[in-house]
Amino acid sequence: MSRWSVVGSGVAGLCVATLLAEQGETVEIITQPDCRAASHWAGGMLAPWCEAESAPPQVIEWGQHAASWWAKRVEGVEQQGTLVVAPPRDSRELTRFASMTEQHQWVAPGEVEPALENRFARGLFFAGEAHLDPRRALQQLHDKLQQAGVPIHSGKPSGKIIDCRGIHAADQQPSLRAVRGEMFILHAPEIQLSRPVRLLHPRFPCYLVPRASGHFMLGATMVESHDSSPISARAMMELLSAAYSLHPALAEARITESGTGLRPAYQQNLPQVRYENGRFFLNGLYRHGFLLAPIMAEKLMLQLTQEISYASGT
Ligand SMILES: Cc1cc2nc3c(=O)[nH]c(=O)nc-3n(C[C@H](O)[C@H](O)[C@H](O)COP(=O)(O)OP(=O)(O)OC[C@H]3O[C@@H](n4cnc5c(N)ncnc54)[C@H](O)[C@@H]3O)c2cc1C
C-alpha cells in the first residue's frame, strides 16, 4: 500500500515520482504498457530562451533551472547551447527571432558548428541552453525509482491519485487539447553536430537534435489535432526538405524511425497543477515537457506537503 499513486510514466509522472521518493514518501507508479507517451517522441531540448519566441514569459522563468535539475539526476545532459539559422532568403526571420528572444549572440554558424561552415552567413547562439536524450533520461529515472523500491505496475492504484496521463487525462480534464507532433530519427554519422540546430522558415521551421552514435531527432510539426496516426506524407516531405536545406548531406541519412506524439495543452499553453474530483493533476506540458516538468513537479510537491501536514495535524 502506497500513500501516493502516480498514474502515467511519461516525463510528468516520472518527475513527480522522483521528487516524492526523494522526500521519503511511499509512492507507486501505475503504467499502461501499450500506450505510447508524448515523452517518447520528444526532442529533449531544454531551451527556455528560444521558446520565448512564441511562449508566455513564465516558460523562460520556470524553464531556466531545468538543465541543472536533470543534470543532478541523470547522465547525458549536454549544456552546449542552441544554434538558430535561416536560409539566406529568410534571413529576416532571424532578425525577427532575435527581437522576440533574449540571451543570444550573433555568430558565424560555422564557428559554432563546423559542419555548417559556408552554409549560413549568420546565426543566433543561445549559450545557456541544453539538451538531453528523452528516452535515455526517462529510462534512468525509471531505473533509479525501481532500485529505490518504488513499485511500477499496471494494476489498481492503492494510494491517493496523482494523474499524469498527458492527453489521456482529457476524459477528466475537458479543457485539455492535443497538439500533434510528427518527427523522425535519422542516422547520418557523417554529420557532426554538438547541439540542437533550429532552422527558421515562415512555414516549415524544423530542428535537428543530436543523439548518440550519429543519430539525430528531426522535428517537429505542430498540428491542432487529436489524431495520433502515423506521420503524414505532407509532414514527411516538409520536414525532410527543411532538413535538406539545413545540410545537403542529410539527403543520404537513413530514416530509422518516424513517430507521432500528442502534446497535452491547456488554453494558454501553460502547464498546471490542479486538484479536482479527489485527485491531483499535473498536465498541459504542451511542447515543454522536459523543460517544465521539473518545476511543475516541485509546485505539485508544495501542494502535497500541505496535504501531508494537514493529514498529520502538524
Ligand atoms: C515531436 C515532439 C517533440 C517534442 N520536443 C520537446 C522538446 O524538445 N523539449 C520539451 O521540453 N518538450 C518537448 N515535447 C513535449 C513533451 O514531449 C510533452 O510536453 C511531454 O511529453 C508531456 O508529458 P506527459 O508526461 O504529460 O505526457 P505523456 O508523455 O504523454 O505521458 C503520459 C503517460 O500516461 C500513460 N497513461 C495514459 N493512460 C494511462 C492509464 N489509464 N493508466 C496508466 N498510465 C496511463 C501513458 O502511457 C504515458 O506513459 C515534444 C513533444 C513532441 C510530440
Image (cartoon, grey):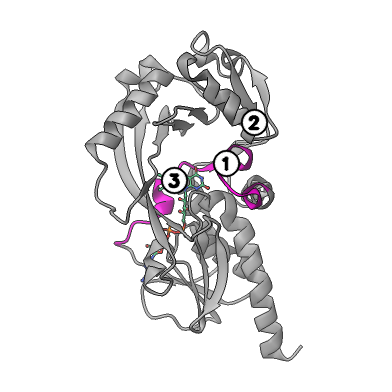
Could you tell me residue 237's position as x and y percent?
Answer: 27, 29
Name the spot of residue 86 as percent of width and height, x first: 50, 21
Q: Picture coordinates of residue 143 (x, y %)? A: 49, 58
Q: Amino acid at mark 1?
A: Glu
Q: Residue sitting at 52 percent across and 13 percent down? A: 120
Q: How far is mark 3 from mark 1, CA to CA?
A: 15 Å
Provide the secondary structure element on which disc 2 rests: helix
The quadrant in which the C terminus is found is bottom right
Ligand 1 falls in quadrant = bottom left
Q: In the figure, is residue 18 to the left or right of 216?
A: right
Which quarter of the figure has residue 182? top left
- Magenta residues? 34-60
Q: Residue at x 36, y 39 (%)?
A: 183
Cβ of mark 2 under 8 Å from ligand 1: the answer is: no
Compared with 139, 8 (above or below) is below
Q: Is residue 3 above or below residue 92?
A: below
Q: Is residue 160 left or right of residue 182?
A: right
Quarter of image, res 27: bottom right
Depth check, mark 3 against mark 1: the one in front is: 1
- Residue under label 3, please give it: 42
- Read off the residue under disc 2: 99
In primary-sequence order, the first of circles 3 and 1 is: 3
Three-letter residue code for mark 2: Ser
Earlier residue among tags 2 and 3: 3
Tell me if the residue at label 3 has its CB under 8 Å from ligand 1.
yes
Marks 2/3: CA–CA distance: 27 Å
Residue 160 colored in magenta in the image: no
**SS at mark 3 in the image:** loop
Residue neighbourhood size for the residue with mark 3, other residues' Cα within 10 Å, grouped as few (<14), some (14–19), many (≥20):
many
Of tags 2 and 3, the one toward the viewer is 2
Residue contact at pointers 3 and 1, CB within 8 angstroms: no
* Numbered circle sitting on residue 51: 1
